[in-house]
Structures are given as structure tokens and as C-alpha cells.
Image (tube, grey):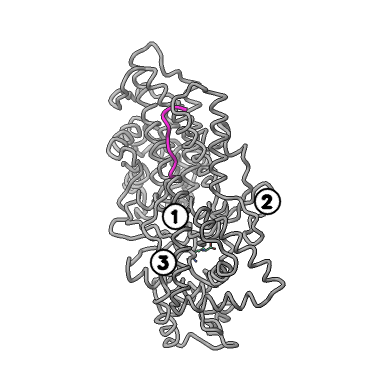
Amino acid sequence: MLNFKQELVKILNKTLPLEREEIEKLIETPSDTSMGDLALPCFILAKTMKKSPAVIAEELAKTIDAKPYFDRWEATGPYLNFFYAPSVLMDTLVETIEAHGIEYGKSDEGKDKTVIVEYSSPNIAKPFHIGHIRSTLIGDALYRIAQRLGYNAVGINHLGDYGTQFGMLISAYKKWGNKEAIEANPIDEFLQLYVRYNKEGESDPSLREEAHQWFKKLEENDEEAKKIWQWMRDLSLREFEKVYNRLNIHFDSYNGEAFYQDKMPEVIQELKDKKLLVEDDGCEIVDLEPYQLTPLIIQKSNGTTTYATRDIAAAIYRKKTYDFHKNIYVVATEQNLHFKQWFKTIELMGYEWAKDLVHAAFGMVSMEGMSLSTRKGQVLYLEDVLNKAVEKTLELIEDRNPDLPEKVLVSEQVGIGAIKFQELYNQRIKDYVFNWDRTLSFEGETGPYVQYTYARTNSLIEKSGVKPKYDHLNSQLLTDEEITLLKLIYEIPEIIHESFVKYEPYFISRQIMEVAKAFNRYYYNCPILVDDEKTKLHRLAMVAMVKAVIKSQLSLLGIETPERM
Ligand code: ARG
């Protein structure tokens, strides 16, 4: 796609006593778009040209020829402002959208590079609760974004399928477990065992020790421990996969913590060889005091390994296996310290790729004042949240459009889309409170609003009875509303790029929201299905473009676009 900024750099380079790179750095995007699409501040030219910035801007405005890319340029104080030529803008967008189809914004910047996105990673045998939703959805969006940018994306679910809590579960199962009940309803039953074990453990300290013993057996490949563990893992994964399928979320690998069990001795040896381990109270630790971090425990006094050891082993394995360009961990801010500690350890081990490890952290969700802790057994299941969203959406549809065909399917797409959109609409790091009405509303800044806008584009096209063609676009007919839309659409590829650089899918959701809002303003101000045939066909082609763009962007967030709502 044509890049207006680069064109402007070339134009200015012909006149200004500056290098291309310098000019590129100078050019700004005015925050008030009525001032122009791009601006050249003339302050630093004042010294060499020995005139005031305002005079320079004035003079440049007269001498420069920025056609055909810009159709208007003018001095405003010390700035020289440029306006895109709408016809050029329109043509370049048509060309790109026709070429990219529903992958608008695709690029090859990631060619031959592998990006690992690790997300979701729930703990086996514990409920998949609303707290997990953030990692799952943010990670899935980053995975899709990486793909659109041409990276070879690898989605990994680093299942919490290992650790002391399995000792606890195995022990609880041996004491009180009922096989049939568990197989019928695994996650609930495991949760109950877990909660009971914690509760009874408060008055009976021997339970803790027993749990440790079972975990130790597991680490030592004890047959019984392994068998129970495998059974628990299979059952849990089966349940999780139901939710993933429903969310249309895919992983390339489920290699979780347990996968690294046999890779840990080597890591411990390596840490020893590199003189990074010190003994502390029977534990093997990495001293991180020089870096203002608490020590990282690698091996406990009873010989078992830790969550951190497994993360180190996993990173080394991934580097060997995938030779990643980035390895991104979508994990809650609660684990900030953990990630700082082991990223530092990797660096101390001498791996230059430590810099390619990214902790894409996110804040907490709370829900109508409810606690989300598993320990007390008070959880809100993700599945129930999804069911409720879909149910409530169906009620809304019954209310607004009871004759809609395929109501049930549409409710599923809109209810789940609403949850996803809401989750991806804010900066990761921000905590937020989940609110049903705000999430599901068809008005306001919600997923259903965008999906509804999409359905509106479709219904306009259907009503017209014509098949829109981009050939029908006519730059002579462009209205201000349409130019606004074109500019928003033009920004999208850069926004996708930025969203990946910052690991922030919300850049994309915000931009789609702007497109949807601008489209609705357009629709109210400029009737589409008018009598004048030329205008009608031109506007229908605009509608078709917006339709394609919304679809291409919602798909980056994993959100469906029902044709009717
Ligand atoms: N299973 C962990 C939990 O639920 C999250 C795992 C995060 N990923 C990692 N590589 N440590 O808290």
C-alpha cells in the first residue's frame, strides 16, 4: 500500500537541507485532523535557514509541490500541514483490500521468524475460571496478529500439569476419591477434593507432608502416581478443550510443566556448572540480590524442582526447538516477580536470547464484587459465564428481532464475541470489573455494537439487490464522512503493527470501534440507497469496503461476524 508519509519524505527531501531519516523523524501526525493529516514542524530549520519557523512554513507552502499525493498544503504558524488527496487514498485502499481480502493489514514483516505465544495455561484439575479468560483471549489475539504479520506463530498452552498440588490431589483422591463421580464430572470433583484437602490440612499438618511425598513419587516416576496423574490430566484436558473449541481457540502444543520433568536435571547441572547455584537452608537457589530481586529457588530441600525450574527448562527447550524470535508469556501481573527472576537467570546463564523473552502481563478481573480464589472453592466457571452471555444475548435478540433466522447460532456468536471484545478493549495492564450490561449491550463501545454495524452493512447490500463493486467508487463523489472512513481504514495496517510491537490487541479493537462509529455517522448523514444510480453504486461500494474491513479486523480478535442480527 502506498505510504503517504514516505511520499512526503521524498517530496521534502528535494527541497530541505535535511537527510531523509531526519525528515522522517520530524514529520508529525496532528492530533486535530482538521489541521491536516501530516505536519512538518519548522522549528529546527530556523537555525540553518536563518528565518523564523512561521516564515519558513509560509515560504515552503508556496514553493513545494506535493501533488498528486496531497491535494492541499498550508502553513499554520510554525507548521506546514498536508492533506491526503482523497482520490489517491481511495485508490490505494481499493487496491490493497482487493489484494488482501479478509486479511486486510497483512504483511511479511515476520517472514522466516518464529514467534511463540504462550497463553491460557490453566492448572489441570482446577476449574477454568474467569480469571483464565484474560490470558486465553489476549494470547489468542496476539497469536492471530502475529500470523497476520507473517510470523510463523506457535501457540503453546503451558499446562499447569505438575507440581506439589498434584501431590495433594493424588493424596486426596487416594483418601476420598470416587472414580465414577470424577469421570462424570471431573473438574467439579477435583475442585472439591482440592478444597477439602486444604481445609482438613489446616487442622492436620500431616496432610501437607503426604502431599509432598506423592509429588516426590511423581517426580521419581512411581507407577501408581504417574497413572493417576495421567488420568487426571486427560480428564481435565478433555474438559478444557470443550471450552477452547467453543471459543474457537487453537494451540499448536499442550506441552505443559510435566513435559519438562526429564529435562530438568540437565538444567540444574548447567546452573551448577555456570556457578549460579548456592545452597541455602537445604535448597538450591540463584542469588539475585545484586539485581534487587529475591532469590530464585531451583530445587527444594526435599529434592523436588519448582515452577521456576520448569520455566527455565521450557525456555531453553523452546529456543532449541523453535529458534524463536520472540517468546511471549501472557500471564497475570501477579507473577511479575517470578518472570523477572527467571528471565534474569536465563541472562546470567549467558543466553543472549534472554532479551527475546517477553512477559505480556495483564491486570485482574473482578466480577461484581466476587472473589475468584480457587482455594475457597468459590469460583465462577468460564463456561457458565459464556452460557450466561449467550442466554442474555438470545433474550435481547428475542426482544429486538424475534424473526431472525438462526437465532441460536447468532446468540452464540454475539454472546461470545461480546465477552471477547470487552476483554480486548483495554490496555492489558489495567484491572477491570466485569459488568454484564455493559458487555452485552448493543449500544456503547461493545462487541455487539460492532457486530451490529457489520450486519447493517450486509443488510444495506442485500436490500439494494446489487453486487457492489469497487469499480463503482468515484472520488468525485466522496463526502467528508467517507473521507473520514477512508483515513481510519488507511491507518489499520500500521495499527496492527503497533499492536504487535506493544503486545496490545486493544489498539485494534479501538480502531474497529472508530470505524464502526464513523460508519454509523456516515449512514445517518448520507443515505445509501438513493435514486441517483451513480451515487448509490458508489456508496454501496463504500459499504462493501467497510464490511470487508470490519470482518478482517474482528477476525484478528477471534470474533465472528454474523450477516444478520
Ligand atoms: N499455570 C499457571 C497458573 O495458572 C500459569 C502458567 C504461566 N506460564 C508460565 N510459563 N509460567 O497460574
Measuring from the top left, give residue 177's x and y in whole percent. Answer: 56, 64
Residue furthest to the right in view is: 203
Measuring from the top left, give residue 555's x and y in whole percent. Answer: 40, 42
Q: Residues within 10 Å of mark 1 (few under 14, many from 20)?
A: few
Q: CA distance from mark 3 to mark 1?
A: 33 Å
Q: Work out whether 393 lies above or below 473.
A: below
Kindly tell me whether residue 240 is visible in this rendering: yes
Residue marked by disc 1: 238
Q: Residue at x 36, y 39 (%)?
A: 64
Residue marked by disc 2: 370
Of 343 and 283, nearer the camera is: 283
Measuring from the top left, give residue 362's x and y in whole percent. Answer: 55, 56
Q: Residue at x 30, y 40 (%)?
A: 100
Q: CA distance from mark 2 to mark 1?
A: 27 Å
Amino acid tagged 1: Arg
Residues rendered magenta in the picture = 557-565
Measuring from the top left, give residue 327's x and y in whole percent. Answer: 41, 63
**Between discs 2 and 1, the one toward the N terminus:** 1
Residue marked by disc 3: 356
**Between discs 3 and 1, the one toward the N terminus:** 1
Q: Quadrant of residue 165?
A: bottom right
Kindly tell me whether residue 67 is visible in this rendering: no
